[in-house]
C-alpha cells in the first residue's frame, strides 16, 4: 500500500489522515495522473494539455523532418495522431487554442524546408485522400468523434457504475435529449454533451442515430426515446404529448399485456376526444396495434453500422463526406508515397514551375521551359507535354512492354 495514494472528496482532513495511518499509504491531492491521464483538473485550461503538446513537439521535431521525405513525414504524422492525443481526446474536449497549437506543430513538421509559395492550405491537407487531401485528419473532428462514443456507452451500458454516477449527478433532461445534463454545472460530462452542437454544424444529427429495440419496455421511454418511428413520438404526436400526465413514462406503462393481447393504457390530463388530439389518438393506436413486448431487456442499436454497434469511423466518414463534383486524384499503391504526393502537389498547382512563380509575383526572367525552350513551364507541361517528358513516357511504355502512354 506504500505506493498507493488516498484522496478525500468532501471528507474532513482528520478523517483522511486517520485512514492513511490505518492503510499505511500516502496522501494524494488533485489533480493527479493515472495511466498517463490527468484526473481532477479543469481541462478547459491550456496548461493541463501541456503533456500532449510536449509529446507532439518531441515526436514531430524539425530535425526529424529534415531527414524524412514528404511521404515519411505523413507516415509519422499519422502515427503520432493515432497514439499520442487519442487517450486525452477520447475523454476531454480540447480547447480551440490547444488544437491550434497542435496543428501548428503538425504544419511546421510537414512543410519543413518548403517555400511559402509551395504550401497548401491546411484545410485541404487534412481532408481524406478520397476528398483530395493527404488524409492526415482534422484534430477537432477526431476529438468530437471520439467523445461521441460516450453517448453510445451511456445508452448501451445502463448498469455500469460510471453511468449510474452520471445519472445521479445530471438527472435532468429536456424533451429531445437522449443523455442527461445539468446546465448549471461545468466539467467533462457537460463538454461531452455539448458536442451535439459541433456535430449539427457538420450536418450530423447524433440523436437520430440511436434507436431503441423494444424488449420488455422497462427502460425505454415511451414518448421521448426513438424506438418505433424515425422521430420520438413526442414530436410526431405533439398534441397528445401536451395532455400526457407522465411525460417520461416507460413503454411498459403504456403497453401492457392482458391475457394474450396487448392493451394500451393512457393517462391524460384531459381526454383527447375532438380535433387534432382525437386524430392523433387514432393514429398512434393504429401505429402501436402490432407492437408486442417480450421478456428480454430493452437494448439500443447504432444505425450507422450493420452490426448495430457504435463506430467512430462512421462519424469520421460523415464529417468528410463531400458531394461536390470535380477531379479527385486517385492514389496508386504500387508507387512510392512521395510520387503520389508529387502528382498531388502538381494537381494543386503547387510545384515551383516558372509560371507558378510568376503568378506569385516572383522575379522570373522568362516563363519558357528551360528544357525545350518552346512552351511556358507549367505543371502540365513539365510532367506531360514537354518533348523530354514525352520521351520519358515512351521509354517507360517500351520498358514495361505496354502500348504507348498518352497522359492527356
Image (tube, rainbow, N blue to C red):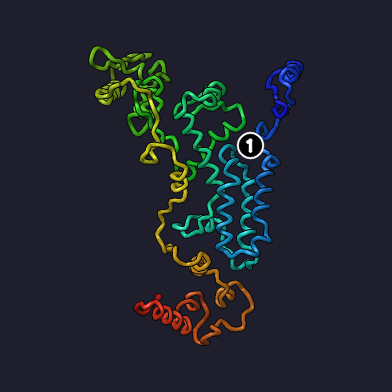
Viewport quadrant of the C terminus: bottom left
Residue 117 pos. (x, y %): 61, 68
Q: In the displayed image of the protein, which residue is found farthest to the top?
A: 259
Q: Is residue 208 visible?
A: no
Residue 356 pos. (x, y %): 56, 73
In the rendered image, which residue does mark 1 sit on?
35
Viewport quadrant of the N terminus: top right
Residue 111 pos. (x, y %): 62, 62
Q: Is residue 142 left or right of residue 46?
A: left
Of residue 16 and residue 122, the one placed in the foreground of this image is: 16
Which residue is rendered at x = 58% and y = 41% of the image?
Answer: 87
Instruction: Label 1, secondary structure: give it.
Output: loop
Q: Is residue 362 visible?
A: yes
Q: Is residue 168 left or right of residue 203?
A: right
Q: In the displayed image of the protein, which residue is found farthest to the left?
A: 260
Which residue is rendered at x = 53% and y = 42% of the image?
Answer: 144
Q: Is residue 282 left or right of residue 211?
A: left
Which residue is rendered at x = 64% and y = 64% of the image?
Answer: 67
Residue 141 pos. (x, y %): 53, 46
Q: Is residue 292 above or below residue 125?
A: above
- Residue 271: image quadrant is top left
Which residue is rendered at x = 73% and y = 20% of the image?
Answer: 20
Of residue 312 and residue 63, the one placed in the foreground of this image is: 63
Amino acid at each position: 500500500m506504500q505506493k498507493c495514494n488516498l484522496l478525500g472528496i468532501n471528507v474532513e482532513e482528520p478523517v483522511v489522515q486517520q485512514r492513511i495511518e490505518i492503510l499505511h499509504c500516502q496522501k494524494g491531492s488533485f489533480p493527479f495522473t493515472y495511466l498517463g491521464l490527468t484526473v481532477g483538473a479543469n481541462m478547459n485550461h491550456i496548461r493541463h494539455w501541456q503533456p500532449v503538446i510536449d509529446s507532439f513537439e518531441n515526436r514531430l521535431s524539425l530535425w526529424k523532418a529534415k531527414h524524412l521525405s514528404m511521404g515519411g513525414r505523413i507516415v509519422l504524422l499519422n502515427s503520432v495522431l493515432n497514439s499520442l492525443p487519442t487517450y486525452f481526446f477520447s475523454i476531454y474536449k480540447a480547447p480551440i487554442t490547444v488544437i491550434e497549437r497542435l496543428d501548428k506543430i503538425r504544419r511546421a513538421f510537414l512543410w519543413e524546408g518548403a517555400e511559402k509559395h509551395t504550401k497548401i492550405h491546411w484545410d485541404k491537407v487534412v481532408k481524406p485522400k478520397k476528398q483530395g487531401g493527404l488524409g492526415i485528419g482534422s484534430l477537432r473532428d477526431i476529438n468530437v468523434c471520439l467523445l461521441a462514443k460516450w453517448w453510445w456507452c451511456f445508452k448501451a451500458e445502463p448498469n455500469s457504475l460510471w453511468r449510474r454516477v452520471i445519472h445521479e449527478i445530471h438527472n435532468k433532461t429536456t424533451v429531445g435529449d437522449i443523455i442527461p445534463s445539468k446546465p448549471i454545472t461545468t466539467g467533462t460530462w457537460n463538454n461531452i454533451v455539448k458536442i451535439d452542437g459541433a456535430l449539427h454544424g457538420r450536418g450530423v444529427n447524433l440523436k437520430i442515430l440511436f434507436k431503441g429495440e423494444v424488449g420488455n419496455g422497462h427502460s425505454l421511454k415511451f414518448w421521448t426515446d426513438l424506438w418505433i418511428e424515425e422521430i420520438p413520438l413526442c414530436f410526431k404526436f405533439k398534441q397528445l404529448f401536451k395532455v400526457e400526465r407522465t411525460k417520461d413514462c416507460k413503454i411498459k406503462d403504456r403497453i401492457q399485456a392482458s391475457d394474450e393481447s396487448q392493451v394500451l393504457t393512457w393517462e391524460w390530463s384531459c381526454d383527447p376526444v375532438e380535433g387534432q388530439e382525437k386524430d392523433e389518438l387514432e393514429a398512434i393506436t393504429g401505429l402501436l396495434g402490432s407492437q408486442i413486448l417480450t421478456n428480454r431487456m430493452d437494448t439500443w442499436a447504432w444505425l450507422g453500422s450493420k452490426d448495430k454497434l457504435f463506430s467512430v469511423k462512421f462519424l469520421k466518414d460523415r464529417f468528410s463526406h463531400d458531394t461536390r463534383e470535380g477531379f479527385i486524384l486517385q492514389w496508386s499503391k504500387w508507387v512510392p508515397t512521395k510520387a503520389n504526393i508529387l502528382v498531388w502537389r502538381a494537381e494543386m498547382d503547387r510545384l515551383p514551375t516558372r509560371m507558378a512563380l510568376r503568378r506569385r509575383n516572383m522575379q522570373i526572367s522568362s516563363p519558357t521551359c528551360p528544357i525545350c525552350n518552346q512552351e511556358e513551364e507549367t505543371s502540365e507541361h513539365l510532367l506531360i507535354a514537354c518533348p523530354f517528358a514525352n520521351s520519358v513516357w515512351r521509354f517507360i511504355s517500351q520498358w514495361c512492354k505496354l502500348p504507348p502512354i498518352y497522359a492527356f
